[in-house]
Amino acid sequence: MSLEAIVAIIAGGLVSGSLYALMASGLSLVWGTVRMFNFAHGALVMVGAYSAWYMSNRGGLAKALQPLGKSIIESSENSGALGGLLLPLGEWLVSMRGGFGLVLGVPFAILCCGLVGYVMYVLLVKPFVGKPGADLVVIITTIAGASFMQNGVQVIFGPRYKQLDRILTGPPLQVLETAIGLQEVLVIVLTPVALLLLHFFLKHSKLGMAIRAVAQNDDFAHLVGINVGQIYPLTFVVSSILAGLCGVMLGGLFFILPTMGAQELLFAFVVVVFGGLGSLPGTIIGAYVIGFIRESSAYIFSLYWAPVVLFATLILVLIFRPRGLMGGEES
Amino acid sequence: MLFQVENLTSGYGKIDVVRDLSLHVDDGEHVGLFGPNGHGKTTLLRTISGLIETKAGKVTFQGEDITNLDARKIVARGLIHVPQGNQLFPRMSVQENLTLGAYVARTDKHKSSNFEKVFSLFPRLKERLTQRAQTLSGGERQMLSIGVGLMGMPELLILDEPSVGLAPIIKEELARAIAEIAASGVTMIVVDQDVELLLGICERLYLIEKGTVSLETADVSQVDQAEILEMYFGKVT
Ligand SMILES: Nc1ncnc2c1ncn2[C@@H]1O[C@H](COP(=O)(O)OP(=O)(O)O)[C@@H](O)[C@H]1O
Ligand SMILES: [Mg+2]
């Protein structure tokens, strides 16, 4: 294997690992706390990508607001003081016809995903919490939710592929004579930052500690005064935001389409089981390991063989460590 | 009267475990509950603290009706229940467990002095601050469990079987600590199999059988305890 290939595999592994880590950590958090698997988690990736696109791209919200901006400008010309006040707004809207950029796009995606995550919890999960067989019922309801979101997005945005603007433009980074795209570099660098923020939230904030407390002993969590009923939706919101971030990154690397996130969800499940159910450190280590396995098997065999190699590895790990890499070591 | 349970009935599903039970605790009093295993003591405590629904009857705390209030609202009033089996957050450190004990807002301003109180009562916890709860010994876990309860600044502290399964030396150490908490003026309900331990702490005892109070003592703290025991419960040892 050439040095060039090794660098490419490492870079590719870091990118895939980052995406899996963002996605699987949310999945793992929900599993650890609510004891349910959210099959709409992949659709949230898609929601993140679309909402970032809608806010940032000139074909999105900015385009939709152009007529409003123009009519404000027109009407302000023949309507006194109020018109004068509104004029700058109209001019601003018209001036933003190139899109609101990712500076607004990313926070908007976070907001949307948090909101969708909350609504999803209320509609698809909450009615079944504490009832017998809830974990199985929720598999069905969240699959239904995912399908609803995918079709809804298809209706709203149409089937044509979209792509996010590049945050960094310029020639790719040269590492040992191998070119690595700036977008990829961004993913590699920003993901650990997001995961570190997650770590600090869970470890040091009151609500984050409450999430972990409920995950470890919900009975005792009640007895120290934690509002357990509030922690479940909060966990969904946090997990959905992580999925949304993954979507924004995916949207910067590949095309955005209604079914995106589905394959990532599959890999994220592999990661969660591989790393040890409910263990956040295990999940994150697992994500990067799976990322590297995927990239190297794609290089050595072919992209189509990557899932086969992955599942073979998963089965092997589970034979020797039935609870995954760090099972029973939950955060 | 600080705390009163009137004609309480509760249980699991259709089965009533606690039946028509009444008891009361005065301000500053320490009351012991004992009785055979499986007769509903834990169920009673879990009903009081809002983990199990009250089917009938009434629970009053500080003059207010707290029947079927959410557990967290009961905790916020200072009714703190340290559950049976030294329950903790197993994969969190001693410090994190104690911090979570002070989750309710009314304890915010007193957090550091409460930490000091817990450490002076249980110096071992201070030595093991960063250790995960699940790696502590049984006695230490029980100490931590009580410590978490104290971080919540109890107006009424309820301990469920604090001495169960502990070696005699540890048990003595724990009994001393509980007596110290009692002496510091915290009102308490203590459930334990060990009547002698209860007699060292409590002024009054209730015998719980088949989900209800079958015997209630007068003040046992002033009189010869062996005599009291025989009088009420026959030969107990
Ligand atoms: N979660 C539960 N579901 C159904 N029955 C229970 C449950 N917990 C306890 N019980 C039953 O309730 C009865 C009283 O138990 P408990 O309150 O734990 O008694 P004690 O604390 O006096 O030993 C027992 O018969 C027990 O089997
Ligand atoms: Mg019991």
Image (cartoon, rainbow, N blue to C red):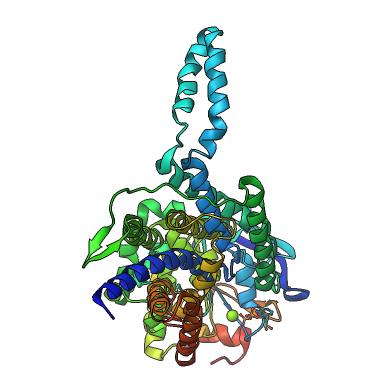
Most foreground residue, B228 or A109: A109
Question: Residue extending furthest right?
Answer: B14
Residue A166 rendering spot, x and y as whole percentages: 38, 48
Most foreground residue, B212 or B67: B67
From this view, report whether residue A167 is shown above or below residue B33.
Answer: above
Most foreground residue, B218 or B64: B64
Residue A240 rendering spot, x and y as whole percentages: 52, 57
Most foreground residue, B206 or B85: B85
- Could you say which quadrant of the image residue A14 lies in? bottom left
- Could you say which quadrant of the image residue A137 lies in? bottom right
| Relative to B50, B57 lies left or right | right
- Could you say which quadrant of the image residue B215 lies in? bottom right
| Relative to A313, B1 lies left or right | right
Residue at 59% x, 56% y is: A258
Q: In which quarter of the image is the N terminus of chain B?
A: bottom right
Residue A296 rendering spot, x and y as whole percentages: 38, 78
Q: Can residue A109 be seen in this view?
A: yes
Residue at 29% x, 49% y is: A170
From this view, report whether residue A15 is shown above or below residue A318.
Answer: above
Residue B78 rendering spot, x and y as whole percentages: 50, 58
Q: In which quarter of the image is ligand 2?
A: bottom right
Q: Is residue B224 visible?
A: no
The mark tally for this picture is: 0
